[in-house]
Image (cartoon, rainbow, N blue to C red):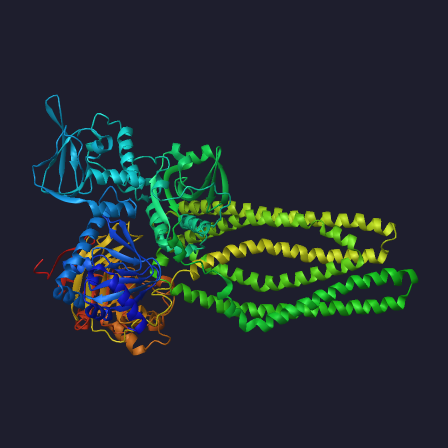
Amino acid sequence: MSVPEAVDARELVGELPGFAILPDEVRALVAESFELVSFPFGAVIVREGDEADAFYVLASGSARVVKQGDHGEEVPLNVLRRGDSFGEMALLADTVRLSTVRASSSVQALRLGKSVFAALTRSHPQVREAFQAIVNGRALWNFFRVHSSFSQLSNEALALLVSALERVDAPAGEIIVREGDPPGPMYVIEQGRVRVYKHSDGSESHLGFLRAGDFFGELSLFRDEPRAASAQAVSDCTLLRFPPELFRRLIDEHPDFRLRLEQRIQQYDYRRVASVPLDFAEEILPAEASVRHISPEQVELETELEAELDAGALEKTGTAAKQRPIRRFPHVYQLDEMDCGAACLAMICRHFGRSVGISYIRQAVHTATDGTTLAGITRGAEELGLSARSVRVSKSRLDDLPLPAVAHWEGNHWVVVYRVEDDHVRVADPARGLRRVPRDQFLERWSGYTSVVGYTERLAEAPEARTSLAWIRPFLRPHLRLMLFAVGLAVVAAALELVLPILTQVVVDRVLPRGDLGLLWVLMAVIVAVLLAITGATLVQRYLLSKVAVRFDVATLDFLTGRLLALPMSYFSTRRTGDIERRLLGARQVRAFFIQSGVEALTSVTQLLAALGLMLFYSWKLALVYLATAPLYAGLMRYSAKRLRPMYDNLEEAYGRYSSGQIDAIRGIETVKALAAEEALRRLMLGRFQALADRVFRTEFLVLAYQGSLQLVAFASFGLFLLVGSIEVVHGNLSLGEFVAFNALVALATGPMLTLLSLWDQGQLARVLFDRLDDVLGPEPEQGADRDRLRTVSTLEGRVELRGVGFRYGGPEAPAILEDVTLTVEPGETVALVGRSGSGKTTLIKLLAGLLEPTEGEILFDGFELRTLDYRTLRRKIGFVLQESYLFDDTIAANIAFGEEAPDPARVAWAAKVANAHEFVERLPLGFDTSIGESGLRLSGGQQQRIAISRALYHRPPILLFDEATSALDTESERAVKESLDELLVGRTSFVIAHRLSTVRDAHRIVVLERGRVVETGTHDEL
């Protein structure tokens, strides 16, 4: 640790209650034992369930503490800032981490190793006692955040509550509160169960049971009335008692606490349970009661308010601030139809002054091919640094809804509500733009499910969008001279064109009145020379631009393909194939706009300005007449930008969907033929094309209408010029030659003007395509852009450890595919994975290959955590046979040695022999040089599997992963392959998935998976 860091460490350590009691020399020694570590925004510092290895003190930045709730949801506990400590709870209890700490900005922290911390607390018991007091308070704090009905209280209110609570024990059978007693303390159940009952007409009426986190006794204090019911401990209970003075103070000083009680009373009034004492009206549910699904579109609701949004309640709890009506609101178009949720949050971020890229938000909200859940939007908003809350709002309370808010609309869409008027609702629709929707229509289409989003200072830490032209510049720089030369030629051609009107004036004013044929022939020669020069300059310019375009296409396509291939598997699993294809095709159209249209635009601007200059020279009056139509052009451009861009967005999305449908149909043609479903598929494809054709028609009609309007304005401008110009000639203010020359200038200026306006139209499409390219350029590459920090895997012994591995598709609220898988495999051991379909076997294999990353726990190879290893070099040491291995349209040898520029014939033959593929390959006319067709169509299923096994063995990897690798083989072929593999597997670690007993019988260990959990392990004989 450097000297400045050490000084800072002494200061921070001295501020901690646990260390402040140490002697100065001991405290200085402890400060020197800390290590300074850094974490980027969003990084996990400690993860719930991991082994506790250190104590931390935050030196700079901020971090969020979260914990997994009872239903798998992530519950925010606290926000840590400079000087706050964490990690001591697990160290003192000698257990695993009890919560996750995630950096909400760039963070620096001081880290004290577990051994030093343990030695310090052993040698100084007073330090342990001080930290234990902190831990006890923190445990109480976490209890209220995770289990209590008061989880939404402000930090100030919760701090007061925790500091003044009294913990009391109630043994089973004890009467805690008796009906009719005077008002007394309010209680929160920390542990145990409590039965609530009431006496009526001499009989006992059971009202319900209360569990950990529920509270009772508040009504008698709130209304100053006797107890309305009795409460008895069913089991041994630990209760947290609110003394009356604490209750009064919380009511008076903290409106959020009072609001929580009022909401509860209103809930019971709303349910018409007045006959039941409000202290004990059923098993009391917190405001955030359950997780539900919106069935039409599989949208998952994180929380639902039991009260239908009491007026102003959210403003008081700090979710959103009361504000003036929003007059202007930024708009962001969705990239694809499933991106509407991410686009809504992008708009809200821009409204609050932070331009966050939609690709980043898409990852934060866990967008899948079926869209984004409400829980995903709310969690994503919190990850971005916004405050957010999922609610279901009564339609009658629309006017009370804090804005902006993300609303679930039309059954399968998300929009931002940013202003509510008497008769209309203003929404920002990611698919159609800013809209003014009649109130009745909005209420009819709104489900009530909403995410209320507010601003916090943490939003400033969210990364801003990086989409810019910067990635294009390196590809343009080598061709800059050629492009400048092409621009120069275009300027020369434009300047020469302006000579023609001048020569026309000379012909009219001098040649015709005087009959000077000699001058006429001279002028004709000059005109011919000018035309030849213009033609030559134009041809050379086109040649240069074509040359640049081809080179640029090659370079950019290689760059984009590299970026695409560097993205993680999660990118491809959440996007349709047709959408990805449209991204790459759009890159060529962007190139055409920037190179060809860019030069054309510069040429047109030069020619237009020169023509306007000559117009002013001839007649400033006529020049102003020509320019009088400029506002009309500007209006058309504005209308075009407003209408065309969303239509281009929708059209690109429709093209992607239709393209995916075509690819899907071609891939499934064998099934179509087998089912004789050609007519059904044809009708399906026709329906999809008609939907696409409707969008194409509307877009093209609008483009034609725009271009027709431009022509109309141009004709109007020309007619106005003829009128005013003729009057000027009649009055003698302009010669006939000047009038003819001016007419030619008008023609020369109108052409470039219409060209520029047409380019404006093309620019709307280019902007759409360029924004969609951000979906390729924006996401972080697999394992990040900086690969220097990764460990290269040069050798691998084959020891594999899985520690509490879990995996979920689609975010923390999604169901677990794998859960708490712990396994240690020694080098050379063969492990068979068995279980029902959907038990998580294939997912586990993909995790081992690094194709997916665990969402919980860790995987270690030879003692090194998977995420720290370079996946590319690791995968070279792993042979992987997928359940449906893909074969490329190439030779058999190239498929076996895929990834090698020149296959090694000897190694190819060896791998084929081991996989029992050599015999059938040798029978083919060209042997290993036989082309197998796209997806291996020329081979049978069993032959394809043997080629896939050969490919997995080609590099002689120390670890093998087989996912139903022999499922397509007949019994004899499988036996032959197994005999060959048995020899090869000696000394190699292997994981095998198979349903046939013969395949797994000889495994060293069989692991049985059920619903993502390991339920049994052992040998075949043991099981």
Q: Dividing the picture into quarters, in which one does residue 491 lie?
A: bottom right
| Nearer to us in this view, 167 or 769 | 167
Is there any visible trace of residue 946 in the rendered image?
no
Residue at 44%, 50% (x, y): give it: 352
Q: Is residue 949 left or right of residue 779?
A: left
Q: Dividing the picture into quarters, in which one does residue 832 lie?
A: bottom left
Check the image and report above or below for 348 versus 30. above
Check the image and report above or below for 849 versus 439. below
Picture coordinates of residue 904 (x, y %)?
32, 77
Picture coordinates of residue 316 (x, y %)?
35, 41
Picture coordinates of residue 214 (x, y %)?
20, 40
Check the image and report above or below for 355 versus 784. above
Look at the image and tell me in which quarter the C terminus lies.
Answer: bottom left
| Nearer to us in this view, 599 or 433 | 433
Q: Is residue 405 left or right of residue 587?
A: left
Q: Is residue 416 left or right of residue 51?
A: right
Q: Dividing the picture into quarters, in which one does residue 863 lie?
A: bottom left
Residue at 68%, 63% (x, y): give it: 606
Picture coordinates of residue 495 (x, y %)?
72, 66
Look at the image and tell me in which quarter the N terminus lies.
Answer: bottom left
